[in-house]
Image: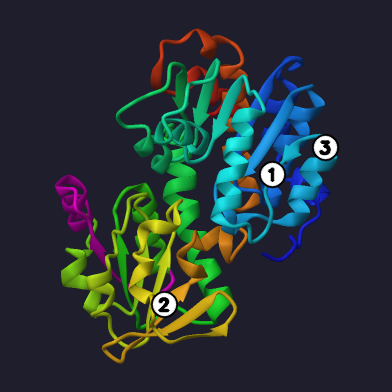
């Protein structure tokens, strides 16, 4: 990814909520916090603030496609141990996650449950973690079933994050990134949104604002009904995808755009993903297909049918891989909630019962007193 166009001084100037929440934290000497998160310029103020309070930090990415090396350098200068780099392989990423566990953390702050899932998936002994935070719906989904013996606080579903970031900013910034990278607008395009959670709702509304004719595919009957009440054409992925000019996924689930559907797409179709993980699109469908990169962030494949389809940002998170993600003022609230959540798991949250809990309103509301 290119170096951020924005200096850290500009970023911090537009993040006053984050600054206030960090300043309110107590002395963090003795805290060893292992974090997995997007390493873009907007997360650097958090790391600098935690380090100033005395916390020891081990950081890796939650998504290798969103790493920016200038941000990694800034975090290291702040005193954090950062094991991540642009273009890192999956093997290197898994090694970095394992390294964070060997580092001996006392607490986790995760976006995708990477540390916790690594422990469970590999059958490893659980370390002495006092409490953790989880920021994403996909991370919460990965925690279904066997849980570790410490409390985990879900802040993805707090109303202000779900309503602001998930519902409004992901869709808006996805289409910003798409247009800026392709110079293609959604006018006269049939746009299929796969998934109608809060991310999908924002993708659909923003697609219409950008000129698209919107269709929605959703497997949950209640959400499907909601999409119909919102005025969208609805159906299954199999029914709607062959008619789409642009397809975007936003579910947090695995292979919601499967290979047999990709094989039937129309010539010129664009495919992109706005979910946290790269596996929402079955990328194996492109194995062996002739390909070229006509412009950065777009790979054009020729399918066996003869149709050409365009994969955006390699199927990775579109708005942060090919763009800048949330606006500073919107992400300021998200990051302030994270800072408040970290304060919680270092104090009262440690005494909660084991299991997944919603981050209490008394905690996240400190980041937005008017909420």
In this orientation, does residue 342 appear? yes
Horizontal side, residue 108 vs residue 71: left or right: left
What distance separates the C-alpha of mark 1 from that of mark 3? 14 Å
What x and y, as percent, mark residue 262?
28, 74
Q: Pick whichever of labels 2 and 1 is earlier in the sequence.
A: 1
Q: Residues within 10 Å of mark 1 (few under 14, many from 20)?
A: some
Mark nearer the viewer, 2 or 1:
1
Q: Rounded to the nearest whole Å, what is the CA distance between mark 3 and mark 2? A: 42 Å
Q: Residue 258 at what x, y percent from top left?
A: 27, 65
Which residue is identified by label 3? 78
Q: In this figure, which residue is indicated by the disc labeled 1?
A: 83
The first of marks 1 and 3 along the sequence is 3
Q: Secondary structure at mark 3?
A: loop
Which numbered tag is attached to residue 365? Answer: none
Which image quarter: residue 106? top right
Q: Is residue 368 visible?
A: no
Question: In the image, which is nearer the foreground, mark 1 or mark 3?
Answer: 1
- Tell me the element at label 1: loop
Q: Which residues are magenta?
A: 210-229
Residue ID for mark 2: 186
Q: Nearer the viewer, residue 229 or 308?
A: 308
The residue located at (26%, 88%) in the rendering is 305
Quarter occupied by the N terminus: bottom right
Q: Is residue 212 above or below residue 266?
A: above
Residue situated in front as seen by the camera: 250 or 371: 250
Mark found first going from the N terminus, 3 or 2: 3
Q: Quadrant of residue 43?
A: top right
Side of 242 where 184 appears, left or right? right
């Amino acid at each position: 990814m290119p170096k951020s166009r924005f200096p850290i001084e500009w970023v911090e100037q537009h993040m006053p909520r984050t600054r206030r929440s960090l300043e309110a934290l107590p002395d963090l000497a003795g805290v060893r916090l292992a974090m997995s998160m997007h390493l873009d310029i907007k997360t650097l103020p958090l790391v600098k603030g935690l380090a100033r309070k005395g916390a020891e930090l081990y950081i890796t990415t939650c998504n290798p496609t969103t790493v920016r090396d200038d941000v990694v350098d800034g975090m290291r200068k702040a005193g954090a141990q950062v094991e991540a780099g642009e273009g890192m392989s999956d093997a290197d990423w898994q090694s970095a996650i394992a390294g964070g566990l060997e580092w001996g953390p006392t607490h986790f702050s995760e976006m995708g449950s990477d540390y916790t899932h690594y422990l469970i998936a590999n059958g490893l002994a659980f370390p002495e973690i006092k409490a953790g935070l989880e920021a994403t719906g996909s991370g919460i989904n990965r925690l279904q079933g066997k849980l570790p013996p410490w409390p985990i606080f879900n802040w993805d579903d707090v109303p202000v994050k779900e309503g602001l970031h998930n519902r409004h900013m992901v869709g808006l910034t996805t289409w910003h990134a798409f247009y800026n990278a392709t110079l293609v607008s959604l006018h006269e395009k049939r746009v299929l949104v796969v998934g109608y959670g809060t991310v999908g709702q924002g993708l659909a509304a923003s697609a219409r604002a950008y000129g698209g004719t919107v269709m929605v595919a959703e497997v949950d009957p209640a959400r499907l009904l909601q999409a119909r009440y919102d005025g969208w054409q609805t159906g299954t992925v199999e029914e709607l995808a062959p008619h789409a000019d642009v397809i975007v996924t936003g579910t947090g689930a695995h292979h919601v755009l499967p290979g047999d559907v990709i094989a039937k797409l129309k010539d010129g179709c664009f495919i992109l993903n706005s979910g946290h993980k790269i596996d929402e699109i079955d990328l194996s469908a492109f194995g062996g297909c002739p390909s070229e990169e006509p412009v950065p962030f777009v790979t054009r494949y020729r399918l066996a049918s003869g149709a050409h389809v365009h994969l955006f940002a390699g199927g990775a998170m579109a708005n942060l891989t090919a763009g800048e993600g949330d606006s500073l003022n919107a992400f300021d609230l998200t990051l302030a909630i994270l800072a408040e959540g970290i304060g919680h798991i270092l104090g009262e949250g440690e005494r909660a019962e084991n299991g997944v809990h919603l981050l209490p309103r008394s905690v996240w509301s400190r980041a937005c007193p008017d909420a």
